[in-house]
Amino acid sequence: MINFNLRSLLIPRKMTIQNLADASGVGYWTLVHMSQLTYKSIKFQDVQKICDALDITPNELFGYKERVAQ
């Protein structure tokens, strides 16, 4: 399962989603939906803007966790 680590990256920076929207130029509601994993697709352009604003790489923004068989 792919993880989107946005909220865990904002906390140590004491940033809100609104702060990130202002800094990155990505829309507030786009970021909200991304952070809640309710988006079906993400634009590479938005990923780049988020990474630039947070001074991170896409590897830090995304993670991968294997699903455990139930």
Image: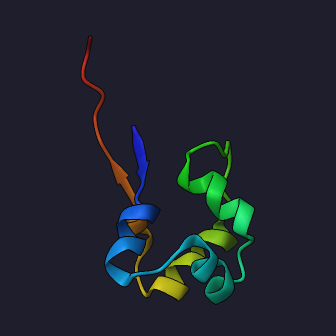
Rendered residue at 30%/28% (across/down): 67
Task: Please name the residue shown 65% across and 52% down the image.
Answer: 33
User: Quadrant location of residue 53?
Assistant: bottom right
Residue 45 placed where, x, y %? Answer: 68, 73
Rendered location of residue 41, percent (x, y): 68, 48
Q: Is residue 1 above or below residue 57?
A: above
Q: Residue at x 66, y 78 (%)?
A: 21
Quadrant in which the C terminus appears: top left
Percent of width and height locating residue 36: 56, 48
Total marks in image: 0
Quadrant (top left, top right, bottom left, bottom right) of the N terminus: top left
Say above or below: 21 vs 35.
Answer: below
Q: Residue at position x 42%, y 66% from top?
A: 61
Farthest top residue in view: 70
The quarter holding residue 2 reads top left
Classify residue 67 as left or right of residue 47: left
Residue 58, compared with residue 23, is above or below; it is: above
* Residue 25 image offset from top left, x and y in percent: 72, 83
